[in-house]
Image: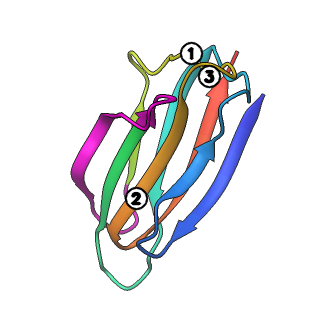
Amino acid sequence: MANYKNVTGTATTELLSRGSNYNNITSILLASVNGSGTAATVDLFIQDTSANNFYLLKGTSIPDTVSLALTDNVKFDNSSTGYALYIKLGAGAVDVHIKQN
């Protein structure tokens, strides 16, 4: 099963809500797709039910037309009492591909 999102703008975007049950994530692919040469600046984080953030990426720059694959330690509890996954861009645009077994 896979989940795909196109992310633009600087608002925080929910990629996986709590209860989506993506509990066996094998990879998260972030492709910088702005097209104008502007790198994407990415914060990728999980958030618990008390709104505490835990960052997988913080202020990470991904050059335009380059992809970043996260394949190690990307599993987390995505049950209804677990964590939601969010992305926030400081600049650029990204396509996100979340894959699970």
* Residue 83 magenta: no
Q: Is residue 8 left or right of residue 91?
A: right
The one nearer the camera, 39 or 77, is: 77
Q: Residues within 10 Å of mark 3 (few under 14, many from 20)?
A: many
Q: Quadrant of the C terminus?
A: top right
Badge 3 is on which residue?
Answer: 78
Say what secondary structure mark 2 lies in.
strand
Image disc number at residue 33: none
Q: CA distance from mark 1 to mark 3?
A: 4 Å
Q: Earlier in the sequence, mark 1 or mark 2?
A: 1
- At 43% from the left and 38% from the top, the residue drawn is 51
Identity, as a three-letter code, of the amino acid under mark 2: Lys
Say which residue label 2 marks: 88
Q: What secondary structure is found at the residue carrying circle 3? A: loop
Amino acid residing under circle 1? Asp
Q: Name the quadrant containing residue 89.
A: bottom left
| Residue 56 position (above or below residue 7) | above
Q: Earlier in the sequence, mark 3 or mark 2?
A: 3
Residue at 37% across / 73% down in the picture?
92
Give residue 79's position: percent from left, percent from top. 67, 19
Give how far apart the Cα atoms at labels 3 and 2 are: 19 Å
Q: Are marks 1 and 3 in contact (CB under 8 Å)?
A: yes
Query: Mark 3: which amino acid?
Result: Asn
Q: Position of residue 78 (x, y in %)?
A: 62, 22
Q: Going by the image, does 7 lie left or right of 10?
A: right
Image coords of residue 77 (percent x, y): 56, 15
What segment is highlighted magenta in the picture? 46-66
Residue 77 disc label: 1
